[in-house]
């Protein structure tokens, strides 16, 4: 409930975190290759070391997790919920370590780091409540058979949970907590860019009393993820990341011998916002800048394409440019920084190449200069580009780049068609004060989360479940009422 832009809150906290700054962390154990984990804002700053899981490590952890699964399942929803709640308590107690790691390992600004811990804690507590709701005893089924019919939910086995770097704690924790709540054991694979945050999260789960055989950490890159999904003991995969990798995992699972293995995938987006001429310019400006540039545009929900009605476009674009030019780019440890680094040199190279292409086509309308010293890290200046249509924008550009497309009065239907034609379906913003426009967009846009007259970066556990459709994922929505049950299997008993 506190104001995360208030320097009187942030500065003392940042002062305390600097005490932790010399601490070196380690993720993983064993004999696998070791790599230094460095900071996105300064590649010379070593935050810790990652020890990659070998093929033998992966096999051993899957065997141990499989052997532990039935005991964990039979322990029941209440016992599992208590341990998830205890983990949430420990996450809160150790929040300053998480803030420090989110800033140093993931390059997040402190307000983002605070929200990240909050969301992880909310996932743990909500899925604990779901364990109590869904896994306590049998569900009596109504019916005319004259028999007693009961439905019970059980864990499926070992879930492999593969996560991205952009929410290195919340999205790392959420699927693992859901798998455990549902009576499964789990292997958690953090992104190769952020293993240290994942390692601390798993350590705290063990400290909370979740047995070491029940939840394991597998450190490494895509090769480790691929080995986990190909392993015959992986009984389900919860994946968050790019659409291309989700499809690769789907192919691996389809080709495996043995049972059909479920995949829950939460993937990329080509998120738009539609602005019509009834929208309030100040509100549009504030919401566009937050949606496109906050977290350096590295939220899966972030705004990529602004469709603005032609007759108000000049005013809106001028105001958005002005607000963008007032942003400060730089070190995420400084409370006045608005835009921090992107995650690594590869991300920067790919974004820079996209901007260079648009510049060559004369499409870049505004950008900012990078500050002195920024070459030590992976910084990308915010950009506004004007495009004639969506045809050139087939990939998701995961950074602070806003593409603007103008549309003519009377052509709202065509704009919705363009949004749907991307094939993605994650978030959509709408700024309009006309009820019939709200109704048309809500009825026709194929997106998982629609945000009306506000920014499009919200996903509050339980009240705003999050997730997309089409190229953006399989559902069910994270933090929603159908999520935990999808990690389970249903068994019905009929007694005469
Ligand atoms: P990514 O797909 O490159 O990597 C995600 C994870 O998959 C990492 O842990 C990686 O090591 C692993 N991986 C890579 N290749 C693999 C393979 N062949 N088999 C198994 N695992 C493999 O994604 P990223 O760059 O870490 O994250 C950014 C992407 O995540 C963006 O597309 C973003 O939109 C998406 N995302 C979506 C949501 C959502 O809720 N829909 C949330 C956050 C991020």
Image (cartoon, grey):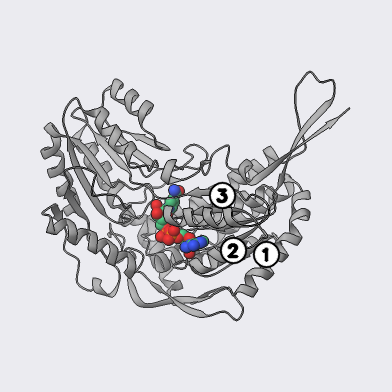
Could you say which is closer to the camera, residue 131 or residue 125? 131
| In the image: residue 475, left or right of residue 300 | right
Question: CB atoms at circles 1 and 2 under 8 Å apart?
Answer: yes
The residues tagged by marks 1 and 2 sit, at their Cα atoms, a distance apart of 8 Å
Quick check: which quadrant has ligand 1?
bottom left
Q: Residue at x 59, y 47 (%)?
A: 125
Is residue 140 placed above or below 231 in the rendered structure? above
Q: Residue at x 25, y 47 (%)?
A: 289
Residue 54 place in picture, x, y as percent = 59, 75
| In the image: residue 97, left or right of residue 333 | right
Give the residue number, with chain letter if any, for mark 1: 62
Say whether mark 2 is within 8 Å of ligand 1: yes
Residue found at the far right of this picture: 496
Image quarter in which the N terminus is found: top left
Q: Residue at x 68, y 60 (%)?
A: 233
Under tag 3, what secondary structure? strand
Tell me if residue 116 can be seen: yes
Around disc 2, counting alpha carbons within 10 Å, would you say few (fewer than 14), some (14 to 19), or many (20 or more)? many
Around disc 3, counting alpha carbons within 10 Å, would you say few (fewer than 14), some (14 to 19), or many (20 or more)? many
**Earlier residue among tags 1 and 3:** 1
| In the image: residue 234, left or right of residue 300 | right
**Earlier residue among tags 1 and 2:** 1
How many numbered discs?
3
| In the image: residue 292, left or right of residue 31 | left
Residue 100 place in picture, x, y as percent = 44, 66
Instruction: Tell me which corner region of the image, top left, top right, bottom left or bottom right, holds residue 68.
Output: bottom right
Is residue 352 placed above or below 325 in the rendered structure? below
Give the residue number, with chain letter if any, for mark 2: 228
Residue found at the far top of this picture: 144
> Which dot marks residue 371?
none
The residues tagged by marks 1 and 3 sit, at their Cα atoms, a distance apart of 17 Å
């Amino acid at each position: 409930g506190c104001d995360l832009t208030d320097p009187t809150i942030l500065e003392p906290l940042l002062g305390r975190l600097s005490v932790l700054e010399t601490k070196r962390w380690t993720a993983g154990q064993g004999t696998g290759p070791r790599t230094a984990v460095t900071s996105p804002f300064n590649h010379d700053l070593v935050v810790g070391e990652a020890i990659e899981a070998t093929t033998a490590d992966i096999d051993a952890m899957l065997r141990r997790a499989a052997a532990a699964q039935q005991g964990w399942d039979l322990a029941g929803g209440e016992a599992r919920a208590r341990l998830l709640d205890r983990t949430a308590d420990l996450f809160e107690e150790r929040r300053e370590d998480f803030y420090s790691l989110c800033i140093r390992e993931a390059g997040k600004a402190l307000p983002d780091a605070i929200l990240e811990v909050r969301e992880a804690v909310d996932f743990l507590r909500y899925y604990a409540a779901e364990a109590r709701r869904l896994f306590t005893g049998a569900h009596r089924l109504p019916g005319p058979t004259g028999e007693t019919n009961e439905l019970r939910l059980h864990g499926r086995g070992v879930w492999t949970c593969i996560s991205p770097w952009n929410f290195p704690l919340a999205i790392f924790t959420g699927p693992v907590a859901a798998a455990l709540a549902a009576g499964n054991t789990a292997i958690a694979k953090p992104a190769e860019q952020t293993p240290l945050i994942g390692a601390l999260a798993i350590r705290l789960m063990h400290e909370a009393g979740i047995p070491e055989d029940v939840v394991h950490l597998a450190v490494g890159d895509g090769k480790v993820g691929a080995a986990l999904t190909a392993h015959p003991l992986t009984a389900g995969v919860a994946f968050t990341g790019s659409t291309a990798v989700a499809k690769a995992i789907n192919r691996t699972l389809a080709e495996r011998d043995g049972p059909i293995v479920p995949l829950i995938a939460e993937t990329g987006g080509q998120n738009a916002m539609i602005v019509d001429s009834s929208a309030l310019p100040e509100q549009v400006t504030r919401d566009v800048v937050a949606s496109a540039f906050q977290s350096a545009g590295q939220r899966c929900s972030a705004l990529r394409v602004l469709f603005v009605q032609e007759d108000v476009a000049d005013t809106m674009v001028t105001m958005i440019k002005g607000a963008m030019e007032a942003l400060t780019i730089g070190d995420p440890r400084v409370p006045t920084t608005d835009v921090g680094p992107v995650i690594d040199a590869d991300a920067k190279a790919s974004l820079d190449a996209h901007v260079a292409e648009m510049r060559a086509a004369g499409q870049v309308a505004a950008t900012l200069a990078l500050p002195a010293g920024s070459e030590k890290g992976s910084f990308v200046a915010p950009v506004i580009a004007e495009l004639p249509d969506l045809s050139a924008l087939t990939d998701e550009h995961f950074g602070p780049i806003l593409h603007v497309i103008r549309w003519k009065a009377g052509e709202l239907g065509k704009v919705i068609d363009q949004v749907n034609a991307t094939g993605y379906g994650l978030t959509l913003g709408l700024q309009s004060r006309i009820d019939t426009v709200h109704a048309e967009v809500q009825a026709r846009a194929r997106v998982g989360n629609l945000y009306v007259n506000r920014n499009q970066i919200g996903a509050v556990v339980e009240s705003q479940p999050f997730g997309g459709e089409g190229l953006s994922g399989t559902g069910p929505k994270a933090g929603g009422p159908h999520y935990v049950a999808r990690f389970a299997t249903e068994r019905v008993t009929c007694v005469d």
